[in-house]
């Protein structure tokens, strides 16, 4: 689990919420991953059919919907990390380091190609 107090406290709050409702029995990595996928799809649904510009200037109601879905995604992602004993911040930092190596600034700045499509 993460050593970051704010994240650790939130993870404990989520765990307590689920324990109080006896929902831990349903929170296998498989089920949490599936639920996470559903919540990400609900987040995508808010942006479906919007232009790039519209997606950057959401009306209040849509922004509220995005906030709620981000909350759901965050809760499930933290629960999954906790269930598997993964330090979520360390995992993100490790992945960022790998991405730095795959996408060096001099090759990838302003480009959307995947790392294996960048010029050598």
Image (cartoon, grey):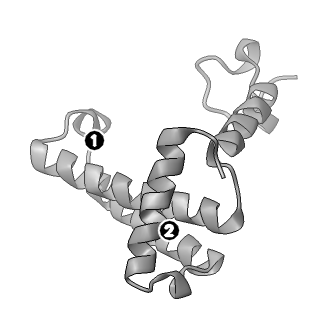
State left or right for residue 17 relative to residue 62: right
Q: Mark number for residue 51?
A: 1
Residue 103 percent across, percent down from the top left: 74, 26
State left or right for residue 21 relative to residue 25: left
Compare residues 50 and 69 and report the one nearer the observer: 69
Q: Mark number for residue 61?
A: none
The quarter of the image holding the C terminus is: top right
Corner quadrant of residue 57: top left
Q: Secondary structure at mark 1?
A: loop
Residue 49 percent across, percent down from the top left: 28, 53
Residue 97 percent across, percent down from the top left: 76, 30
Question: Which residue is pictured at 44% across the width and 63% down the height?
Answer: 14
Question: Which residue is pictured at 34% across the width and 65% down the height?
Answer: 42
Number of labels in the image equals 2
Residue hosting label 2: 37
Q: Residues within 10 Å of mark 1 (few under 14, many from 20)?
A: few
Q: Residue furthest left?
A: 60
Compare residues 76 and 16 and report the one nearer the observer: 16
CA separation, marks 1 and 2? Answer: 23 Å
Residue 75 percent across, percent down from the top left: 44, 60
Corner quadrant of residue 106: top right
Decide: is 79 above or below 59.
below
Q: Secondary structure at mark 2?
A: helix
Question: Which residue is pictured at 75% across the width and 26% down the height?
Answer: 100
Decide: is 66 above or below 6.
below
Compare residues 21 and 76 and report the one nearer the observer: 21
Residues marked 1 and 2 touching at CB (< 8 Å): no
Compare residues 59 and 112 and report the one nearer the observer: 59
Q: Residue furthest top?
A: 106
Q: Residues within 10 Å of mark 2 (few under 14, many from 20)?
A: some
């Amino acid at each position: 689990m993460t050593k970051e107090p704010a994240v650790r406290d939130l993870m404990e709050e989520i765990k307590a919420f689920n324990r109080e409702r006896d929902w831990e029995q349903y929170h296998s990595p498989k089920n949490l991953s599936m639920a996470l996928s559903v919540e990400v799809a609900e987040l995508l649904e808010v942006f479906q059919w919007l232009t790039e510009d519209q997606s950057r200037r959401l009306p209040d109601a849509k922004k509220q919907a995005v906030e709620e879905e981000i909350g759901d995604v965050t809760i499930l992602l933290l629960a999954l990390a906790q269930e598997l004993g993964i330090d979520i911040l360390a995992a993100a930092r490790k992945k960022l380091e790998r991405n730095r190596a795959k996408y060096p600034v001099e090759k990838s700045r302003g480009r959307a190609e995947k790392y294996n499509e960048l010029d050598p």
